Image (cartoon, rainbow, N blue to C red):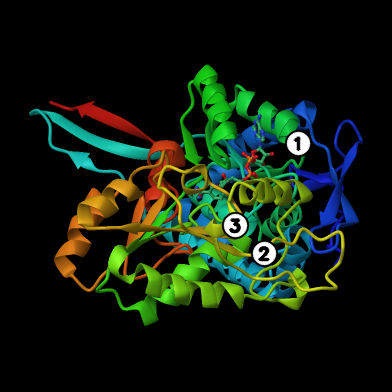
Amino acid sequence: MQPWFDPSLLFINGTWRACASGETLPVINPSTGEEFARIARGGGADVDAAVEAASAALAGPWGALTAAERGRILLRLSHLVLDHAEALAEMEATDVGKPLTQAKADVIALARYCEFYGGAADKLTGQTIPFQQGYTVYTLREPHGVTGHIIPWNYPMQIIGRSIGAALATGNACVLKPAEDACLTALAFADLAHQAGLPAGALNVVPGLGTEAGAALTAHPDVRHLSFTGSVATGKRVQIAAAENIVPVTLELGGKSPQIVFADADLDKALPFLVNAGIQNAGQTCSAGSRILVQREIHDQLAARLSAEISALTIAPAMEDARLGPLVSARQKAIVEGFLAQATPDQILAQASVPEGLPEGGNYVAPTLIGNIAPDHPLAQNEIFGPVQVLIPFDDEDDAVQIANGTKYGLVASVWSADGGRQMRLAKRLHAGQVFLNNYGAAGGVELPFGGVGHSGHGREKGFEAMYAFTTLKTVAAHHG
Ligand code: NAD
């Protein structure tokens, strides 16, 4: 699948151009291991040009638009994304190995983010504040200025939608550094935004390596806000860079999210969620429900039902649209296999089989259920970022909370129980940015604020909350006697 634009170029100031070094990086199809395109290896000079273009846009036509005009551009962009749904989904499936149905869901989510933030653009208001006699005091919500966006490869379109959508709606000018393994839909989005009428420089895309283009963006003194989604290790570096320039940073990092199943849960309803929350996008999901905590009296029953489901999962190249495609890269496959090697044979409760005859260079890993494992085992503590779930028994509510809160992460949690009081108690006690009661929301929720606690990060994106994050508050006090 070849994109409709030249993917080896950068998108800066509304035009396509080669990167300063002229170097390119390969784009590998994870389903086959074959190179099918090249992307630019952007660096410091390209980031400088992108930030300069963004600054000029703020001082020029982009900065002069009203909130309603910005909103209309995003709404037009939403329609253009839908018009290109098939091409975008095929591009993503080929680039990151995501099964076609899941890639299509990401396109719909991207369009929905543009729609949501397009509609929200002129709904953000300040306040008037009662103060002393003779004063009128009010607040203004203003854009930060140039915002830097660094995103990972697992849900490129969704993360572009939530981060760039909210930043543009609030009047910032953006520089986006997509992940090395997933640049195509970011470039396509910039092209569509241009077609939708976004003024030059309001959105610039600089593909390249994290240590080069990414690091240059985080260090740039004219970038006034950083939005980072990715690993904990890189998140720390980004936060340190943000500290050097004293700029706010949103960190959306990893997780080891618990799905807690009590004996009174409706297992027929829960089962598809329990499985899907772990294997969607081949488990490469920050909010994957990768720890299933089960009340001891139904442990064996649930283990048997999960085993049957997981053993039957289908695996195929992304374009054949099975339940799982390959992992994004040979590197990610090696990481997941390294984790799996830590399990003893009695800990592998179930494993699907990778079918014969798949392309040899593809990064296929069999979905696996692990059990007979202590809650503090590395497999139960670390984010694996592959199709691997662990099953851990608990005795009662206190035990469940202790195990659930017993990792360094805190992104999402779910509670499966018929007891309403218990649902409310656990919703308060669980360390997580989102808690789902009798459902699991890893699939989306454009309207729902999202983010973590602990090593899952800080700050919130999605929903209206992101509009606050992408603005700075100014208080105006007028003394008129
Ligand atoms: P990563 O941290 O390796 O890379 C993320 C981005 O950071 C990439 O664009 C990369 O090029 C860039 N980068 C790398 N080094 C950099 C540096 N020194 N300075 C600036 N930028 C740099 O993460 P990944 O492997 O691409 O993504 C997987 C991780 O992302 C997982 O931990 C996952 O949980 C997390 N994630 C979180 C969310 C969320 O919303 N919380 C969503 C998706 C993924």
For mark 2, what is the residue?
366
Vertical order, 346 against 350 (above or below): above
Name, please, the residue furthest toward the front.
346
Look at 75% across and 49% down and name the residue there: 181
Amino acid type, label 2:
Ala
Q: Earlier in the sequence, mark 2 or mark 1?
A: 1
Q: Ligand 1: does it lie within 8 Å of the C-beta at label 3?
A: no
Q: Picture coordinates of residue 204 (x, y %)?
A: 69, 43
Quadrant for the C terminus in the image: top left
Residue at disc 2, secondary structure: loop
Give x and y (percent) for residue 92. Answer: 72, 63
Q: Nearer the viewer, residue 378 or 363?
A: 378
Residue with the most extreme bottom position: 268
Of the image marks 2 and 3, the number of the one nearer the N terminus: 3
> Where's residue 465, x and y in %?
37, 50
Up the image or down, 76 lies above or below 401; here it is below
Does the beta carbon at disc 1 come under 8 Å from ligand 1?
A: yes
Query: Quick one: 97 or 300, which is closer to the camera?
Result: 300
Q: Secondary structure at mark 1?
A: loop
